[in-house]
Amino acid sequence: MSNILKSNRIKGIVCILFSAFGFALMSAFVKLAGDLPNFQKVFFRNLVSAIIALYLIIKNKGSMTGKKENRKLLLMRSLFGTLGVILNFYAIDKLVLSDANMLNKISPFLVVIFSAMFLKEKINKEQTLSIIIAFIGALFIIKPTFSVEIIPYVGGLMSAVFAASAYTCLRAIGNKEEAHTIVFFFSMFSLISIFPIFIYVYEPMTFKQLTYMILAGVFASLGQFGITLAYRYAPAKEISIFDYSNIIFSAILSIILFNQYPDILSVIGYIIVFSASYYIFLYNKKLDKIDSQNIISEDKK
């Protein structure tokens, strides 16, 4: 049994690393696409995801709409996910890439809060402490002021709120739906809901911009499938720390592609948020060890 758990945990870690790499490249290509309307970027991102997910549904003879009893959760996941992507793309356009993505990575801490509120999962003092520390780190990145410069940072933080809401819905869905069904449902919901705005704001694209947007969609799909499968293989508490590899990928891409460097306060914020995540990761490993010892003790009786 323990070998199966370890195997699933490793699969979850691999999936979440692929997801982090995919989302980092997605962010880079979104930024490389230049000064296009935000809703246009979101539309193309989800159009590619929908096509890939549809191919997998047809290949596996899956469902496009999911089971009837899961539709409410699928709709909620799609609504929150769409709002999260819109705000995340806005932050990516306006901020240093690693800043935008680190703010979005506050979402694992928010998942703990939302899971306690809506899924009745228990939250302990160690988790509470890690959440407080993470938000202190977020303040270092945001650097609160009373000027309009703070708006993109608030947008980035709100993208984390909506992403956490979407991931909480994913936790509630669990293994009840296939990954390609969830991704397709979300992508189609997003396409349909923003289509009128997309038509209104549409601007012609160069071949290079179109290529960047297609690539953004491809790597967004890698990220989306990765995160969906990761949380299926292992609980968020065991693997969410590996999602922070996204910040390393983003920082490297930001320096190489855009010659943008995070300032010292942002770096301090990264370290604080990562430290909070590492602390809770070590705490969960300690709990797992205690649980394993208890199981062995029970077996010996």
Image (cartoon, rainbow, N blue to C red):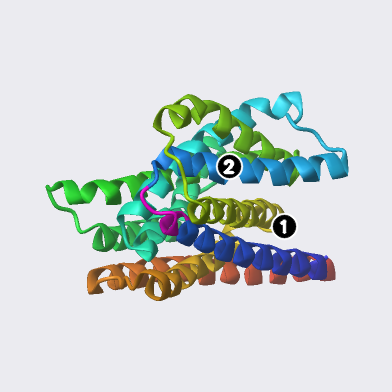
Residue 270 coordinates in the image, percent (x, y): 35, 69
Q: Secondary structure at mark 2?
A: helix
Q: Would you place residue 147 above or below residue 219 in this image?
A: above
Residue 281 coordinates in the image, percent (x, y): 53, 68
- The reply to whether residue 253 is in sight is yes
- For mark 1, what is the residue? 233
Residue 298 shown left or right of residue 70 in the figure? right
- Residue nearest the observer in this picture, 39 or 12: 39
Q: Would you place residue 65 above or below residue 112 in this image?
A: above
Q: Residue at x 72, y 25 (%)?
A: 69
Q: Would you identify the image quadrant in which residue 18 lies? A: bottom right
- For mark 2, what is the residue? 46
Q: Quadrant of the C terminus?
A: bottom right
Q: Residue at x 75, y 63 (%)?
A: 8
What amino acid type is highlighted by mark number 1? Tyr
Q: Residue at x 23, y 70 (%)?
A: 265
Residue density around tag 1, few if under 14, some if 14–19, many if 20 or more, within 10 Å: many
Camera-near label (1 vs 2) is 2
Q: Would you identify the image quadrant in which residue 235 lies? A: bottom right
Q: Which residues are magenta?
A: 30-35
What amino acid type is highlighted by mark number 2? Asn
